[in-house]
Structures are given as C-alpha cells and as structure tokens.
Image (cartoon, helix red, strand yellow):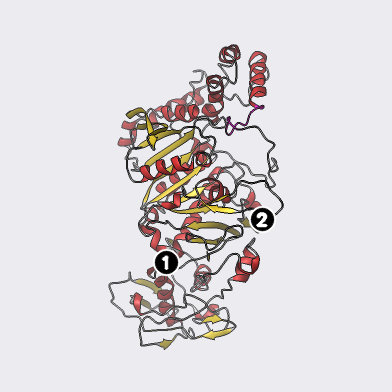
Amino acid sequence: MGEESFPRFDGFAGGGRALKSHGEFEEAMTKVGEVGTRGSISEGGRSLSSREQHRRENPRKRVGEEGKAGSCVEGGRRLRLEGVAAKEGSRAWTKLRLSAENSASVTIAPEPQAIALCFSRHKLEAARASSLDLIMSSPLNLPLATAILFSLMLLPPALSGVSVTHLPGFTGPLPFQLETGYESMGNEEFFYYFVQSERNPREDPLIVWLTGGPDGCSALCGFLLEIGPLRFIIAEYNGSLPSLIYNPYSWSKVANIIFLDAPIGSGFSYSTCASDYELNDTVSSLQTCNFLIKWYESHPDFLSNPLYIAGDSYAGKLVPLVTHAIVTGELSPLFSNLKGYIIGNPITDKLFDSKSRVPFSHGMAIISDELYKEIKENCAEEEDYDHPNPQNLLCYGALSEFKKFCSEIYDKYILEPKCPPPFMQKSIVTTKRSLGEELYKDILLPSQAPDMKCRTQYAQYLLDYWTNNSATREALHIKKLKSKTFLCSGDHDLVAPFRGTHAWIRSLNFSIVDDWRSWHVHDQVAGYTRKFKDDLTFATVKNAGHTAATYQPENCLAMFERWISHESL
C-alpha cells in the first residue's frame, strides 16, 4: 500500500474522532477486517498469558499486508475483496469530501450494504451479487476503500478480541459470553474482559469496571472476587489448579460488564515505552476514555446501551474523573448514553477518610473512650490523621496508640482474622498519583479559611465559594449533567469507613430527599440508605467489608439491580 497511491485529504471522522494526517489514515486502513475469531482460551491445555500468545492462537492478517491493497489474506494466500460501486447521492451515508491529487473535489456517498467485507479469517461474504475487484492502483479508488472502513460500523458487532468458551479450573463450557482482547493506543496495550449480560445484552446497561489502586489492580479482582460471573472454590491449596464455580450473584445477570486492566502496568496491560508508566490520576482517567473510544469502534452496537462508569476502593478517585472527562470533553457526543457512575467503598479525600477511622473505631469498641477523647482534644488542628505533625507531641502520641490498635485487626473487614498479605506490598511499577491542582478546584469543597493576611490564599477561598454557588453556575451557563450517582459502603470496612464516605457526601450540601431508612433482601435488613438531590444515593451494606460484593454478593446484586432499574432500594 504505497504512499503514492493515496491522495491528500483534509481529514474525516473515524470512530468518534478526526484522523488528521495521511499516516493516521493509512494506519487505520490497514486494520480493516481485523476483527478476530472465536476460539477457546484454554485450547491445547494452556491459557493465554500475553498478547503474543493471544495473537498466535488467533492469527489475523491486515488488509494490504500481503498482496495488493484491498485484499484479505488467509493462510498465506490472497482472497479477492468484492463489492459494488459506490453510489453518489445516497442518503444512507454522510457525504465525505476528499481532495484528490489533481485538486479536484470528489464527493461520495456509498450504499453501506453494497460493500463486501473480509470480516473473519474463515470466510468472505458479499452483501450483493454484483461485484468487482478493488484495485488501489489509482487514487480515485480511495473513496470506496474509505467506505469499506466506515461500513464496519454498520455491521453486527464484530469482536475485537477472542470469544472464550472454556477456562482452566472450570468444568465444561462457560455459561456466559466472555470476550478478552487488547486495544492498542500507540505504545500502550490495554487488556480487557468483556462479559455480556445474561438477560438482554442489546438493551441492558454497559458497566465499565475499574479496580482499586493506587498503583492499579488486575481486573481479575473484580472478575473473580467481586461482581464477576466466576468465583474460586475456597479449599486448602494442594498445589493443583484452583477450581472455579459459577457466581449466581454476578452483576452480569443484569448488565454487560467491561473489566479493564487500567492503568498501564495493571494486570496484562502494558506499554513498550517506560515513560507511560509514570502516571497520575488525571492521565489514568484519560487512558480509560481513550480505551472506550477504541472499544466502541469494534463494538458499535453497544453505543446505544446505557453506560455507567464504576469501580471500588481507589476508583473512588478515578471514576468521577473519567465521568468528568467524558461529559466535559469534545467526545461527549460519542458517550451520549452515559447515565451516571457507581462507586463501592470509595477512597475519596484524606480529610474525610483518615479522620473517620477514629470515630468508627470508637463506635466498634476498638479504642477506649479515653483514647478517643484524647485524639479529639489534641488533634483538632490536624487535617491528615495518617501523617500528623510530629511536633504536635500529644496528638502524635495519641494517633500512634490508635494505629497500634488498628494494626492488630484486618482493616478491610474487621470481623475477619488478621492474616499476612498473600502478595508483595511494594509495587513493581512505581506510579505517581495525585489530583492535579486544576482538577482539585473542581471538587465542591471550600478550603479552610486562611488568615486574611494571606491575600492570595484568601482570594482562592472566596473563589471556591463563588464558583460553587448555584446562582453563579446558572449565570455562567455551566452545563448540568443529568446523571445518577450511587455510592455504597460495607459497614465493617476500616479502610474507607462508611462514616467518612457519608461525611464527604454531606459536605456537598445536597438536600435529603429520602431520609435514612433500612433496605431489605428476603425480608431481612441488608443495610441502610439515604437519597440526596440530583439523584445521588448512598447505601451501607450490612456485615460487609472493603469491596462489599466480596462479602455480601447476593445482597449487592439485589441492590445494584434495583438501582439500575430506577427502583427504590
């Protein structure tokens, strides 16, 4: 596919964005027909552990990689790509304007059903009987090639990964539709697990699930330990392959779920460039947005499904940033079906998370009344209980005593025994995670009033109040997002206590529309809930720890299904 065979052009929309350069267009064209095949991930008694194995078991050649451009390659031989001539004036396609080499303007509007596509390595299907060979020897054949690229979006969903029918440790075929694959973005390769809804995949919501951090966790945590369709059989390990069983309380019962290995360095996601591993929360959230754009290109049928960004633990920082990036960026039309976000046991802000552990521990009889009173009296000026000022000796000593008590219990679920961690605490990949100064201003929390002598800081303090006033936002025509928000917390979690999450919500000064009450499963109290204005719901999950669905899967599924169905908990 020589460069001389292409005309120059001004740019055209491709998968929700504009391809600005000739090089980008050529790269995009080479991916026509690269949609993969179905096969078993455990074929030959081994599982896929890397992108290279993934490709070896699913060989896919690029159009034009061998032979002439416009052909598909299968088993080393060229197949003929057939179709019919594009028809000018069709209403089915938006007209594309391209500037040819002779500066003449060429306008095309091909019939989408008149294009034949190589959409798998097994067969070549023609949409209509009439056909002709596509020879890219002339620049004037570019319009038809462009039409082929765009017609991919009008076909039934073509899987960019591979269909997985079996997994090691699970007996028999999987009782759900699973796809795994990579989405490439420059040097970055993002791995995902996509589970289709077991109820109605064409209409049920699409959930993008981000696991905690801050250095990132494999998506398998969500897939196998929390809300996914499989779980391990808990038995004494004897050196053999652990066994898996079906999870009857998977959220895939009522929703499509993408479990994403993000950020780069998590799970099977990787980059060939070392600098891509130097991350912060802002960069990580944009990576997720870019992944979604690529994923939708190969799964266009899911564009119409209601979309929710979701996660737990450290995702309490990332999920709102991803949502914010989507609704405020230029890509918002592509995500027009974004309905809201979901966060479980969220890490939010140290001002709330670290301070809430003290009253939580006191209420759970972990610390004495005397120690609780000592901390309240001596640490009133401390904002971060995790890193108190060592010069405040009384506070520092009291918090050291508090940390000693907490170190004796399992903070993620205080009812379970404390055990040594089964993995290395130190991350292999060192990442920098912090909310940038500009994004921190978007949080609706006015800073503590500084001294009037600090003119710059005091001006920022006033700006916080002014900007977040509803009248100011209305006057500035600030866009309002009509989205639902759901936050839940296990009531025995000391890592991100429910008291801290609730205090964080209350700091937003949202009025209460449905006051504190219990919610039930099988006529038993499953937790407590409160609903705020702007469709924000908070719920506790009774007898659950950090990542509540791990401990109460049935109740969490009931809670989730009611919420996405717009029902009362």
**Numbered disc total:** 2
Report whether residue 230 is seen: yes
Quick check: 459 above or below 184? Answer: above
Q: Residue 350 at x, y = what percent? A: 55, 30
Q: Crowding near pointer 2: few (<14 within 10 Å), some, many (20+)?
A: few
Residue 87 image position (x, y, % from top left): 32, 80
Magenta stretch: give its range. 407-416
Q: Camera-side residue: 293 or 357?
A: 357
Q: Which residue is mark 1?
A: 157
Residue 557, compared with residue 171, is above or below; it is above
For residue 408: magenta?
yes
Residue 108 visible in the displayed image: no
Q: Secondary structure at mark 2?
A: loop
In space, the residues marked 2 and 1 are separated at their CA atoms by 34 Å
* Residue 89 highlighted magenta (yes or no): no
The x and y percentages for residue 281 are: 55, 43
Residue bearing mark 2: 241
Rendering coords of residue 78 (x, y %): 54, 85
Viewer-nearest of discs 2 and 1: 2
In the image, residue 82 above or below residue 525: below
Near mark 1 (Cα within 10 A), the count class, few <14, some 14-19 or many ≥20, is some
- Residue located 62% across and 56% down the image: 270
Query: Which residue type does callout 1 highlight?
Result: Pro
- Say if 13 sits above or below 434 in the image: below
Question: Nearer the N terminus, badge 2 or badge 1?
Answer: 1
- Give the amino acid type for the residue marked by disc 2 in the picture: Leu
Q: Main secondary structure of the magenta part?
A: loop
Q: Label for residue 112?
A: none
Residue contact between numbered discs 2 and 1, judged by CB atoms under 8 Å: no
Identify the residue at horizontal 57%, vertical 78% (top origin). 65
**Image quarter in which the C terminus is found:** top left
Viewer-proximal residue among 102 and 119:
119
